[in-house]
Image: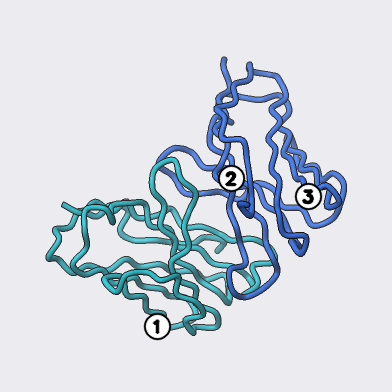
Chain colours: A blue, B cyan
Amino acid sequence: QKEVEQNSGPLSVPEGAIASLNCTYSDRGSQSFFWYRQYSGKSPELIMFIYSNGDKEDGRFTAQLNKASQYVSLLIRDSQPSDSATYLCAVNLGRVRDNLFFGTGTRLTVIP
Amino acid sequence: DTEVTQTPKHLVMGMTNKKSLKCEQHMGHRAMYWYKQKAKKPPELMFVYSYEKLSINESVPSRFSPECPNSSLLNLHLHALQPEDSALYLCASSQDPEGTYGYTFGSGTRLTVV
């Protein structure tokens, strides 16, 4: 079983809609959770992180964490064409060795 | 300064060449990382330096040789690479060795081996 799983997509949403990206993880010892955005040919950019159960909002982005279900999601409200990118979910196990595990990424396309 | 700076941005090298990739951060981060990323794949960890010491080596071929001259600098020396080594090479840093607050990535070096 993979450490971190994401639906690879592609996920297409119309401009102005809500994009919902999902991620599950296998290690119950996971301590912190990250969403990275990666444009084609560019490096990953950290856009959200969450440590506690519940929701965390930052502008148009909301991260949701449910540790009991081992599930983390990212909602993007009022999606814009500039949000079109691959979104990588990453899970931190809080140890020095092998501490960050990436999902395979979900490719999001926002249609104007 | 909240950036990780990588040079060069692009590199084309022959299989007999020796080249080096450079990475620099001035955020006081205590761990630095080299990742390799192929198209449509997530980053793969290559090397971790924690407090300037090599912490893990993910069974990377010896044609890749990391070096950490000081807490702000990280190099990746390349020698006798193969075409399949062509990829985006990413440097990252984290505030603590456990990566508690996430990683900051540099813009990457696009490497092509011919």
Tell me whether the residue at label 2 lies in contact with that at label 3, contact meaning CB atoms closer than 8 angstroms. no
The disc placed on residue A88 is 2
Q: Is residue B4 above or below residue B66?
A: above
List the residue tagged with mark 1. B69
**Mark 1 and mark 2: Cα distance apart in space:** 31 Å
* Secondary-structure class at tag 3: loop
Using the rendered image, report if marks 1 and 2 lie on a common chain. Answer: no
Image coordinates for residue B107, horizontal then vertical, percent: 43, 53
Which residue is at a point 47% across and 81% down the rendered structure image? B54
Q: Which residue shows up at 58% across the image and 77% down it? A: B30
For residue B47, which quarter of the picture?
Answer: bottom left
Q: Which residue is mark 3?
A: A70
Q: Which badge, 2 or 3, is on the more N-terminal residue?
A: 3
Q: Chain of mark 3?
A: A
The spot of residue A95 in percent (x, y) is 67, 73
**Amino acid at circle 3:** Gln
